[in-house]
């Protein structure tokens, strides 16, 4: 049945809000519709027969209000419990990542054939100009400069202090590569940001028209990404935030490399870092890492 529509309240009819103002609630069915103008346009509401009403029961209203508050509080408590569980699960996962990283450092320390390598370069996309190889125990097996085919960039020179003049009489890459391969052989290499060192070695080899066997990523292990959980910070995408070798050393209570980065200083700093973590086997914090976002679905 189509209900009549009114734009003025007829005698004997009222909407629910109007009845409530009089302390009444409707007991009968909707008998018509009321159409009224607002800033958003025309809206409608139900109209009831004013003869079929009852007085509002204050006790009943109070019970309804109390029930509403109880339901809302129960939902809040349930959401809180769910959030606490999500945070506990997130902490467990983060702590597992931390412990896995510590165990990986311990395995590296216990691998006698593992060698640590570090380089200095003409720039972020440039050639190797200094290279050092050391054992985890801190024995330096190779420490040499390399004469590049391109100039050292100003930003890179500010990092390591090496100039074109200093490198002019250094051995060229083919000579250094022969010494490097004799020292390394088939052993695995550990570096802090291994991808950078591997690609700079490959770039330097190609500049001399040769291919380095160290281009194979399977020969390398990366201490920077492995250390990231120990830094205990997450990026906005919720992946572990990398940190510098100097900061990692300071976090673990070992001497970092000098302010002017040199290859042998970086290699020995990483050796100290591996040794310290393997000796201490640090336990993860019992609080969530910085930057984590936990949301209850």
Image (spheres, rainbow, N blue to C red):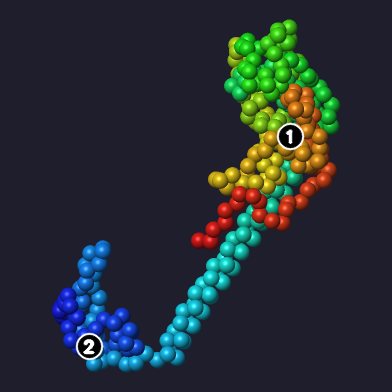
* Residue 143, image x, y percentages: 78, 19
Left or right of 65, for residue 271: right
Work out whether residue 179 or residue 59 is closer to the camera in this orientation and state it.
Answer: 59
Is residue 61 toward the left or the right of residue 16 in the image? right
Q: Residue at x 69, y 56 (%)?
A: 287
- Relative placement, left or right, of 122 versus 66 is right
Q: Residue at x 57, y 56 (%)?
A: 294
Residue 195, percent from left and from top: 63, 29
Q: Quadrant of residue 109?
A: top right
Using the rendered view, name the quadrant where residue 154 is placed: top right
Which residue is tagged 2? 49
Q: Secondary structure at mark 2?
A: strand
Per the image, label 1 sits on a secondary structure element best described as helix
Q: Which mark is residue 246?
A: 1
Going from N to C along the chain, the mark reached first, 2 or 1, is 2
Q: Position of residue 212 (x, y in %)?
A: 65, 19
The quarter of the displayed image where residue 274 is located: top right
The local crowd at label 1, few if under 14, some if 14 to 19, many if 20 or more residues have their Cα within 10 Å, is some
Looking at the image, residue 266 lies above or below residue 293: above
Tag count: 2
Q: Is residue 185 visible?
A: no
Q: Is residue 131 visible?
A: yes
Q: Are marks 2 and 1 in contact (CB under 8 Å)?
A: no
Does residue 100 lie above or below 21 as drawn?
A: above
């Amino acid at each position: 049945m189509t209900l009549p529509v009114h734009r003025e309240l007829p005698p004997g009819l009222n909407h629910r809000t109007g009845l409530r103002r009089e302390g009444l609630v409707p007991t009968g069915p909707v008998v018509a519709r009321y159409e009224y103008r607002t800033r958003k346009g025309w809206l409608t509401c139900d109209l009831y027969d004013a003869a079929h009403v009852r007085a509002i029961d204050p006790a009943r209203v109070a019970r309804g209000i109390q029930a509403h508050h109880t339901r809302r509080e129960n939902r809040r408590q349930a959401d809180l419990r769910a959030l606490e569980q999500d945070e506990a699960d997130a902490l467990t996962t983060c702590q597992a990542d931390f412990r896995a990283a510590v165990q990986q450092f311990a395995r590296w320390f216990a691998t006698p054939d593992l060698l640590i390598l570090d380089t200095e370069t003409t720039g972020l996309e440039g050639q190797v100009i200094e290279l050092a190889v050391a054992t985890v125990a801190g024995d330096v097996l190779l420490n040499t400069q390399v004469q590049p085919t391109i100039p050292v960039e100003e930003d890179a020179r500010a990092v390591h202090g090496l100039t074109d003049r200093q490198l002019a009489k250094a051995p060229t890459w083919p000579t250094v590569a022969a010494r490097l391969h004799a020292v390394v052989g088939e052993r695995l290499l550990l570096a802090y940001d291994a991808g950078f060192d591997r690609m700079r070695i490959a770039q330097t080899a190609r500049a001399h028209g040769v291919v380095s066997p160290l281009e194979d990523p399977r020969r390398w292990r990366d201490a920077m990404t492995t250390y990231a959980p120990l830094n205990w910070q997450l990026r906005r995408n919720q992946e572990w935030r990398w940190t510098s070798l100097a900061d990692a050393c300071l976090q673990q209570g070992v001497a970092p490399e000098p302010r002017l980065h040199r290859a042998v200083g970086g290699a020995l700093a990483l050796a100290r870092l591996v040794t310290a973590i393997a000796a201490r086997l640090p336990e993860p914090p019992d609080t969530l890492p910085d930057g984590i976002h936990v949301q209850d679905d």
